[in-house]
Amino acid sequence: MTSLSALLNPFRGMSTRARALRGTGFTILNVGGRDFLRLLANLVLTRLLFPEAFGLMALTQVFIYGLQTFSDVGIHTMLIQHKRGGERVFLDTLWTMQIIRGVILWVGACALAFPAAYIYDQPLLTVLLPIAALSLFIEGFKTTKEAEANREITIERVVVLRLCTQLAGLIVTALLAYWLRSVWALVAGTLVASVMRVIVMHMVLPGKSNRLHWDWAIVKETLTFGFFIFLSTGASFLINMGNRIILGAYLPIAVFGVLNIAIMLGAAPGQISRAIAQTVIFPLYRIKPAQQSTDNQRNLFRARRMVALMSMGMCAVLAILGVWVVDVLYDPRYALAGPMIVLIALRGILISPFVGAQEALIGNGDSKRHFYLNGSMAALQLSIIFAGITWFGVAGALIAPAVANLLLYPMRARFISRYAAWDIKGDLMLMTLGLVLVLAISWFNWDALLLAFDLNLLQ
């Protein structure tokens, strides 16, 4: 009992270290729990629905995610990073801006429905996209209390509520899938989860409720700061969704549905590490700037290295077991997801050393260089995706992010070194370890990788 108490002592209290440790633990719980629930639902839904339903929903989500990112003017970032992030007038003005943005996003989704249906030759998108995009309108009303908790790295209650509402939404989705046996079950479940999350967060999280308010000075400052955030998140959309946008036009809809299941499983370690970077390391750059002291720098480097090693370890395990996991959990229609998971996990190993580095820019309010880096990454990655598809098929598109990250390392290093955030020793150590792991696991899973490089998948 005494040893357990001693083990938990570092997590107690309100010191920056204790909050960072708790924040890391609850971020892992949040992303890990979210992905576990999604996997559980996926195992049920793949037995009730056909791969085409997942392909249609994946295309819909690409457009919804695109609208979200291409319209981001830095509201959430301002709430966390700005010195006035705790003032009521500031919070309520940004909340009002968020609502207006949600309305505009839904209108934009309606306008995109017909072009999307034509481009991908899926007539159902004309109805599916506007209805699914109601989630954008609903989430425009989410409370700023979530961002306030993130700002102070006190996300424990937020995580528990998110998981509870997600579980409720997944139960609704499964019941509707059993009844409807169509993609509409996925849409309805998403909307129910959005409504529940917004209502529960408003009611349960501590703090004052938001009210409509408009302060032109705050709006102007947000839009000025958010200009490069807007450009940067647009680039982030192309980085995160570029391969799906392109492959969605190349692949049969059933194969595209299988690919998205592989991405859901294979990208989980990367999502966990990026979430830790955004919810813990990003606020730490504001609270304990690396350029302020060598102690701060050393602690930030240590935190980044720990997150990177954790990410590489999870990716390595997934790369080794990916084919086996799919064979055990899914029926033969989804067997191709196994080799794809292996490739995505290997890509994750190579990207892991860079987790948390770019947060140094936005943590210091440098939205301009943050955009320059993201814009360059998007342009380079899309070019590699097109070349990769031509030469290596689906596999060429999946490995593009790793190649782009490695090629842009000098640019990233130059930018973050302005804020004493370039950990050259740690980066070299982690990149070397990552390369060794990739070579060893590739040899172990060579037959599966050959299947992922099959050019016939595009036909």
Image (cartoon, grey):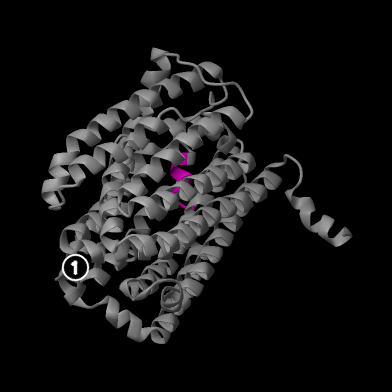
Query: In the visual, does 171 lie left or right of 254?
Result: right
Return the x and y of residue 106 as percentages of the image width and height.
28, 32
| Residue 423 x %, y % | 51, 58
Image mark count: 1
Q: Is residue 437 above or below residue 314?
A: below
Q: Which residues are magenta?
A: 355-362
Residue sticking out furthest to the right: 2
- Position of residue 277 relative to residue 222, above or below, is below
Q: Quadrant of residue 113?
A: top left
Residue located at (51% from left, 16% from top): 89
On screen, 255 above or below 284? below
Element type at mark 1: helix
Q: What residue lies at 18% left-to-right and 62% top-to-bottom? A: 386
Instruction: Say if residue 154 shows up in the picture.
Output: no
Residue drawn at x 40%, y 27% as measured from the top left = 98
Give x and y (percent) for residue 153. 61, 40
Q: Quadrant of the C terminus?
A: bottom left
Query: Nearest the camera: 133 or 288?
Result: 133
Is residue 391 magenta-colored?
no
Q: Quadrant of the N terminus?
A: bottom right
Task: Look at the picture and state if 113 lies above or below 316.
Answer: above
Q: Is residue 308 left or right of residue 8?
A: left
Magenta run includes residue 357: yes
Image position, residue 413 (x, y; %): 41, 55
Mark 1 Cα-neighbour bin, 10 Å: few <14, some 14–19, many ≥20: many
The residue indicated by pointer 1 is 389
Asked which quadrant contains residue 15, the reply is top right
| Between 324 and 174, the one nearer to me in the picture | 174
At label 1, the amino acid type is Ile
